[in-house]
Image (spheres, helix red, strand yellow):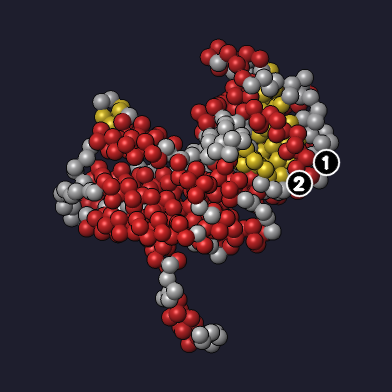
Amino acid sequence: MNNWGIVGIGRIGLSMARNMSDKGISLSLYDKIFENKSDPILEEKKLYPELKKVSVFNDILNFIESIERPRKILILVPSGNPNEQVISKLITILSDNDIIIDAGNTNPLISYRNKLKIAKNNILYLGIGVSGGTQGVLEGPSIMIGGDNSAFKKVKDDLSLITSKTIENSKSYDFFGDSNQGHFVKMIHNGIEYVEMQLIASIYKLLFDSNNYNNQSIAQIFEDWNNNLNSYLIDISTQKILEKIDDKYLLEKIDDVAEDNGTGRWMLNYGVELGCSLSMLSSAMDTRFISKLQSERNEINKNIKQSSKKYKVDVNSLKSAYKFCSLVNFIQAFCLINAANKTYNWNISISKVLNVWSNGSIIKSSLINDLYSNYSVENILSDKKIIKDLNHCKSDVINIIMLSLKNDISIPCFNDALNYFNSISSNSLSTKMIQAQRNFFGSHSIKIK
Ligand code: 6PG
């Protein structure tokens, strides 16, 4: 009998199987695509000796029978239909008190529905967000957990074996509450990730289009910055800037249409639902959406006069502007967590969230550690230090935005960060006029100070 079962042996599933097996957890593996294959991961077993011990099944019933009770079944199939199908099938064949662990990027609303559906069948449910990509999952992912507390207690020792050491010297997993709060925290992680990715992309674009920097010199700037930023996303971007295909830089040849898996859209929906500003995420998502209008963009571009550009970028100012934007990104995400806690009666601790993200996650960086140690993250808008830091960097953001405007370079997210700061620090917003207009045509009542 094996300790755990994994359903879904794609790239992430394989990394997870390698990590778990390497730590001495005995595994049964199953994937729909294994059906009719006699030894489906023969090649992988040759490449990775730690997989020699795992049992591989091409029949789901035999797979289930091979796992000790109460069974722990980890699902790592794409979110949406494939994930729903696996859960529906498992419900019909598992026994009382077995545990279904959905480790996909599942929409928190669906995660909640699944929990109820699973509980009706006397099966326990954990919804877990797993961050780290193929390498991170292999080396020690960041794991955000929600669902049944008694199920959590049954899996936590094994999770300790496969995760990384955090800033608190604990391991990079935590339980955030019943129902769908693990998937919610993962969704927030992804929203932060999207904005960070866009900020780095905007910086690369501003530098490259200046005609004063090439890929080598931009990579050097990123590398220098990363001596103290220690950002995973800056690190991988540096590697991608230097990557070549047939003697040309990848970034000169790569198609610019950007896809998304939906997590950013769900977070925007939560923002609307809870009345929270997520202007930076909205801008990052807009940019991906606009990128899809490729033929339209190409046509319009033909009718726009292009001036040849050459401008100077103050790299220190750019780094300071980047810090400003990253801080606002976290402020917006933290405010959404607080609003969810208040509205849904949850108790997600932002410090705990930062601790889990501090290692193994895609957004790991010194900034996470800095926020954790030096700011009052649970009440970020009352924190004097963050406001002082933002004020200090503000003139740099203005300089960088002005530079981009003068040279027709779109640097999404920068302007949204500045606008947010200007609004959040104002004691007299333009909404006075909104209230007056509402009062005129809708006879809505107004408050006179
Ligand atoms: C992670 C990532 C991962 C996500 C990819 C792709 O934490 O490991 O967030 O879960 O699926 O980043 O996301 P998009 O396809 O939406 O860019």
Determine whether, in the image, residue 257 is placed left or right of residue 370: left
Image coordinates for residue 83, horizontal then vertical, percent: 64, 39
Q: Which residue is mark 2?
A: 117
**Cα distance between the residues tagged 1 and 2:** 10 Å
Q: Is residue 131 above or below residue 371?
A: above
Q: Nearer the viewer, residue 379 or 404?
A: 379
Q: Is tag 1's residue or tag 2's residue first in the polypeptide sequence? A: 2
Asked if the residues shown at circle 1 and circle 2 are in contact, with their CB atoms under 8 angstroms apart, the answer is no
Q: Nearer the viewer, residue 421 or 378?
A: 378
Q: Is residue 204 above or below residue 40?
A: below
Q: Residue at x 84, y 36 (%)?
A: 96
Disc 2 under 8 Å from ligand 1? The reply is no
Q: Residue at x 75, y 43 (%)?
A: 148
Q: Residue at x 50, y 52 (%)?
A: 375
**One can see residue 218 in this view:** yes
Q: Is residue 116 above or below residue 168?
A: below
Q: Which residue is mark 1?
A: 122
Q: Nearer the viewer, residue 127 or 292?
A: 127
Residue 428 falls in image quadrant: bottom left
Count every numbered label the image shows and give the total. Answer: 2
